[in-house]
Image: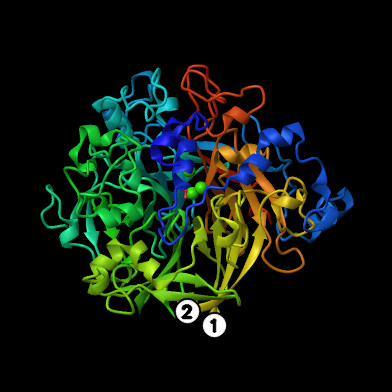
Amino acid sequence: MDRKDIINDPEYGNKAEAFEAFDDIPTNPNLSRTIGDVINARYGRRDLLKGALGVAATTALFGTSAMVAPKQAAAAASASRYKFDELAWGNDEKHHIAEGYNADILLRWGDPITADAPEFDVMNQTVEAQLKQFGYNNDYVGFTALNEEGTRGLLCVNHEYTNEEVMFPGLGRQDRDGFTGMTKELVEIEMAAHGGSVVEIAQGDDGTWALVRDSDYNRRITPFNTEMVMGGPAAGHERMKTNDDPTGTAVIGTINNCAGGMTPWGTYLMAEENFHGYFWTDVVDAEGKPDVSAQPEATSMKRYGVPGGWYAWGKFHDRWNIDKEPNMPNKYGWIVEVDPRNPDAKPIKHTAMGRFRHEGAETTISSSGKLVIYSGDDNRFDYLYKYVSTEDVTEENSVFGSSLMSDGTLYVARFDEDGTVTWMPLVHGEGPLTAENGFNDQGDVMIDTRLAADLLGATPMDRPEDANPGPNGTAYVMLTNNTRRTADQVNAANPRAESAFGHIIEIKEDGEDHAATTGTWSILVKCGDPTIEEVGAQWNPETSESGWFGSPDNCAIDADGRLWISTDQGSNWGKTGKSDGLYSLETAGELRGHSKLFFRCPVGGELCGPYFTPDSETLFLAVQHPGTDGTKDFKGFERDSTFEDPATRWPDFDPAMPPRPSVVVVTKEGGGKIAV
Ligand code: FEO
Ligand code: CA
Ligand code: CA
Ligand code: CA
């Protein structure tokens, strides 16, 4: 299936669903491209509802023990390191949190975030208003304190993408019919709703958090008008030069900012994920499909899936049109550093971390003193990366724009069957990364990170999403799913063909040093319903019916070093019947692989964030695209959502308001550390 087929396939009711399908197109040419979608057919929710699978159910990997008896569940709960009563699974129009906790709406799409911002008027949105209002589809959330008590701070939030069919009245989905309804103004509102927000928030005496609207820190970062600079080995490169920037050192804006990270010095990293989707061409082949064969960057474009044609921006702005700006895609797909404390500082795109569909950029300081950043390339059969600074982290270099972020080595992971992981350096002149193979300098290696990693023989993964360093040299890698892997493409670290529910890998770096170039790995859990044998799930047998999940995406480590997982099943939630949510997940001891549900999203929403404040007394969650994904499987609704007719109007439940992506703030009733 290619792009055009996906857009026209009635199966994909909205942009979010089509995005997943686009992700389904592997661009890694090292693989044969078989389509086999057996698991979809076999385990589709509709089949489950019809009982097509019967109840062969009970003989899961752990046999019937996976069907937890209440007594066992109670025993597991008392031994659990996470002290909360598990929430019951389900799926409805609202969000739900475990008993004893508050989950309040902090910021919604359209909320005015500056003193001079107009109030949100969803029927008459403008570019000017959106540039001063909270953006769409909140994804990554980070926090950096402004006072010692941690009761004032800056919240940094990514706005990954926009869903026109639920944002704009009377428009419907636009990518199927050539974007005929899109105007320059609508396109610019979309651009203004992308990017990020930095806002000051403060905690009142009663423990509740609120926006400080008149704070001078508050600002939007957008692909519409935020000037940025390029840094690192690809800055100023010949392939970075464009009509508006003959130096190759500047760029306007950032796009598709998925997850991210906060540096040890409190700056905000925004990962540019599906950047390819924003580029446009008018050059098509005989079948009407985008044709890049005459492009000077053709090889690179093919490997990155450029141009995706997901938005009409290129119809109105030359910089998104590769026919006019063939080098522009090279300026996206990077890690962007923002100084939240200095609104005047231009964000920097750090090219030393490579160019790919960066899911996130989670940082740590290794026991050996280096800055280390883990980042997954979220595409089927793409790779896991790690960046290690050359110098040690010191007080002097712990600053915005630090040389730690430009002088370092990017590694790609190879997972061997014997349980070792080897981090292979992407360094020009080493191994096959030479002019002979098209790499003239380190800039080329960074611009074409994927092509370089192909030559090194990295392990093709099941869509690496978040990768988070944990305590004692550990790292946790979310492999969300990959239904396109065939039985002959299975490898030890990606052990399931047609994996609809994903798995999580735990890495232990040698010497408990995150900068090590070798380590060991193991599978922490294989996700999905443990009561259906064919799913091949692997959980701690104490995991309850509410506790197992599918499609791990983001994760966080709390103040006590404990792991939390948020899920993004996309339109596939019908295969589990569960909405997306936040789960605790034990990593050690007898309960290793034991998961419990803490929070769940309203229907059609994906859970992003999560982010704990340093004292673990506040948890920020981002509910992305509520009411959109998979609503054809939502009992009683069973159709695609539109602005006029959405599956939920969360969080306002106002008949005049569509669903709004929002940040949720979680605190314990009466205060105190979460789940302690
Ligand atoms: Fe934007 Fe890989 O999720
Ligand atoms: Ca994600
Ligand atoms: Ca995802
Ligand atoms: Ca998403």
Seen in the picture, residue 55 relative to 464 is either above or below; the reply is above
Q: Amino acid at mark 2?
A: Ala
Dot 2, how many residues are within 10 Å of its Cα: few (below 14), some (14-19), or many (20+)?
some
Dot 1, how many residues are within 10 Å of its Cα: few (below 14), some (14-19), or many (20+)?
some
- Is residue 394 visible to us here? no
Res 458 label:
none
Q: Quadrant of residue 472?
A: bottom right
Q: Which residue is mark 1?
A: 511
Quarter of the image with the N terminus is top left
At a point 42% along the width and 59% down the height, the residue shown is 361
Residue 592, how many percent across, how many down?
A: 71, 64
Residue 383, how many percent across, how many down?
A: 45, 62
Quarter of the image with the C terminus is bottom right
**Marks 2,1: beta carbons within 8 A:** yes
Nearer to me, 142 or 259: 259
Closer to the N terminus: mark 2 or mark 1? 1
Q: Is residue 182 left or right of residue 593?
A: left
Q: Amino acid at mark 1?
A: Gly
Q: How is the image coloured?
A: rainbow
Seen in the picture, residue 23 relative to 187 is either above or below; the reply is below
At a point 34% along the width and 67% down the height, the residue shown is 452
Seen in the picture, residue 424 relative to 339 is either above or below; the reply is below
Residue 153, how many percent across, how many down?
A: 43, 50
Q: Which residue is mark 2?
A: 516
Q: Quadrant of residue 540?
A: bottom right
